[in-house]
Structure formats: C-alpha cells, structure tokens
Amino acid sequence: MTAIALDAKDRKELLARFLRYVQVDTQSDENSTTSPSTAKQKDLARLLAEELKALGCADAAMDEWGYVYATVPANLDGRQGAASKVPTIGLIAHVDSYHGTLGAGVKPQVIEKYDGRDLTLPGDPRQVIRFADNPNLARCVGHTLVTSDGTTLLGADDKAGIAEIMTVVAWLARHPEFHHGAVRVAFTTDEEVGRGTEHFDVARFGAGYAYTLDGSDIGEIEDETFCADSALVTIEGHDVHPGYAKGKLTNAVRVAAAIVERLPNEFLPETTDERQPYLHPYDLRGDVTKIEMKFLVRAFSEEELRAREDALRAIVREVGAAFPGARIAVDVRESYRNMATKIAEDPKVLEYAFEAVRRLGIEPVRRAIRGGTDGARLSFMGLLTPNIWAGGQNFHSVQEWVSEEWMAKASECVLQLLRIWVERSAA
Ligand SMILES: [Zn+2]
C-alpha cells in the first residue's frame, strides 16, 4: 500500500504554490453587487485553472462567476470491489481574501527553522508577531513559517487551503498506484463577503460529500458554524435649516448614536467567545436625513439568534419612542445556518475526517467555528461539507502567519481521507 506522505519535493512545491497564490490580489468587496464582487479574483482563478490542467485535470475551467471546477477521475477500475460505490469527494477552498485589510502587494516572508523568537515584520516594524501572544508559535518551533511584511494581510485564509488542495491533486498525479474515487475540486469566490456559494451548482459539481479547507489549527475538524443573519437598520430623520431647527429637526445621526449606545456590552463580539452569541454594529453611513446601519447577528442556535434580533428590535422601539420624528426600520436577512444539524443526518462524512486525522498520529479536535464557511451553505444545499484545518493564524490581520508543516499535514489528511472513503465504501 502506498505510504501517504509528502516528500521534500512535494513540500517545496506546496510552499512555492502558496507563495505564488498570495501574491495575487484577490480582495473581495462587500459593497459590490457584481459576481465575483471584484474582477481581480478571476486572476487567481484563471491561474488555478491552468495549473489544474497542467496537473492532468482535463476538464479544469473557470466559469463566468470566477469559480474553478476540476475533476481527478477515479482510478479504481473495479480493483477495490465496486468502484461505483465510492462517492465522489469534493474539495473546496475560496480564492478571495478579506475585504477589510489591504490584500494588494503582498510580500511573503519565509522564516526557515523557526526558533521561537518574536517576529518583527520588515515592512512595518511596529507589527510584531509575539511568541507570548501566539500560543501556536510554540507548536511550530523548527517549522518553516510564512508571514506578510506587515503592511498587508498574508492571505493564508484561504490560499493555504488552495495550495493544500493543489498539492493533493499533484500528489495523486504523481502516485497513480494510489487508488481513489473521483475527486472534484472547486475554488469559489467571495466567501469573505458571504456570497461564496451564490452561484455554486451542487448538481453540476456532482460530489457525494465535500470538505472545505479553510482556517484553523492542525487537527481541527469543524462541523458547526454560527447561525448567521444580517440586520439593516434604516433611520430617516427630518432635516431643516439648523438655524431654525428648534422643535423641528430630527437628526438621524443622533438616533443612530442612541441605538449604538443602548447595545448591551455583553452582546458584542469583543466581549464574547466560545459558544456565546453576538450582535455587531459594523457599518454606519449616511447623514442627518438618513442613516443606514449594518449589524451582524450570530449564534449557534436559532433561538439565541432570534433572541438577539428581538433585543435589537426592542432597542429600536425604545429609541423610536424617544425620537418620535424619526422613522426606523429593521430588515433582518438570513445568511447561513449552523451546519451541524445537517451533518448529524449522515455523520460518516465527519467520522471519516476524524479517522484521517488519527491516521496522521494526531488527536483530532472537533470545533465550532465562530463564523461561517461555504460548507455551511452547501450542507443546506444538499452537499454535506465539514471543514478541515488549513493552518492560517491571525487571519484577516497584517499579522497573519502559517506553518508549512501544518499545510503539508492538511494535504496528507485529505489523502488519508480519500483512502478511508475507498476502504469504507467498497467493503
Ligand atoms: Zn476563509
């Protein structure tokens, strides 16, 4: 049986891929209504489609939305019992990077044989990735690490996931003796702005089960995401000349301030962690006549989600009573739901992932993501898609870093997983 391990050449290529991808600016834009939200995401998508072709995926192509799809055909040929019993496994990562931190002009810094020191980033010496503040650095002494130069994000979220999947595809091409079912690859756009599956064609993708490789630490498998809604609060004031405004003016700016002021401190993302819900005012624009405020609402259960939304409505009513001249509307929209309920309907997709981690000699860690993944939406669209770690740390920040070893282990985890699907399905 083929030993599943990346050799020195595989690892070198993995790192080279990662460095290549992070230098392509793929920042998404949450205020854009086009798909993809920024045309530059297609720059990386095009590159990936070409590289997949070069790795032997004859059907690799980018579609009009910037999604890349490709197939590694099964090579079972009936050798492992009925090849048709082995489901097609999907591997998914997103090309876009976080919209809130500069993603252009990334200059990746490679630190070989990390020795446990603080990492001062050369482009902005005020940016120091401190050993004491990053407990995972202690787990990565001796590893090859990659950071940005401190002036941009790195984009390990999710270019680490992309590089890991590409490395799996390359490894499979190099190891035809390794028997596996069909593998479908998808690289999506606009995950960071919550639109990563807007144009995802589950039927055309044709996978029985899938995994995202996105975020988090080595050994972590995630089958829970938040239940997520967004709330738009629109405040219409009444503007008159301020010199003659007495008793007439209703200032939307002050109404907005009153709403923010009343948010309970313990409801905020900066005061919550683990399984606590939050309510997060994150965007406010407008003027005296009209203000639009955007909120994220997040919780692990729908009951808690509704409780936070009810709290927001109650605050709005209270403020509305204090400003009778204002018209305030709350519009709540569903973003995604906790995928755990869906995955529990067919838990082997999760169990096999745990088994794959164990076969690497690592104790798997089951986690709930305080965020969402493309997998959350896909699980509700009929494709169960838990998440496997991609290794990135401090994501969305200029202090992002990633360990090459953790990336390599993610690729090996996927290869173990492909073997387990064959063993368990064809038996
Ligand atoms: Zn991500």
Image: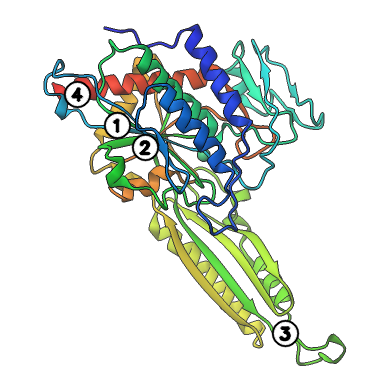
Quarter that holds the N terminus: top left
Q: Which amino acid, mark 4?
A: Arg
Which callout, 4 or 1, points to the residue nearer the camera? Answer: 1
| Mark sitting earlier along the chain (1/3) | 1
Q: Is residue 235 left or right of residue 45?
A: right
Q: Name the residue under label 1.
A: 89
Q: Which amino acid, mark 3?
A: Thr
Q: Which amino acid, mark 1?
A: Ile
Which callout, 4 or 3, points to the residue nearer the camera? Answer: 4
| Mark sitting earlier along the chain (4/1) | 1
Work out whether residue 236 or residue 196 is closer to the camera in this orientation and state it.
Answer: 196
Residue 424: mark: 4
Looking at the rendered structure, the secondary structure element under dot 4 is helix
Looking at the rendered structure, the secondary structure element under dot 2 is loop
Q: Residues within 10 Å of mark 2 (few under 14, many from 20)?
A: many
* Residue visible at 71% across and 26% down in the picture: 130
Residue 32 visible in the picture? yes
Q: Which amino acid, mark 2?
A: Pro
Q: Residues within 10 Å of mark 1 (few under 14, many from 20)?
A: many
Q: In this view, does 372 lie to the left or right of 262?
A: left
Q: How crowded is mark 4: few (under 14 residues within 10 Å), some or many (20 or more)?
A: few
Q: Name the residue under label 2.
A: 386
* Residue visible at 12% across and 23% down in the picture: 82
Which callout, 1 or 3, points to the residue nearer the camera? Answer: 1
Find the distance from the CA under tag 1 to the CA under tag 3.
Answer: 57 Å
Q: Position of residue 11 (x, y in %)?
A: 51, 13
Which quadrant would residue 106 be assigned to in this image?
top right
Number of marks in the rendered image = 4
Q: Where is residue 132 in the image (x, y as percent from the top left)?
A: 69, 25
Find the distance from the CA under tag 3 to the CA under tag 2.
Answer: 49 Å
Q: Name the residue under label 3.
A: 250
Find the distance from the CA under tag 4 to the CA under tag 1.
Answer: 13 Å
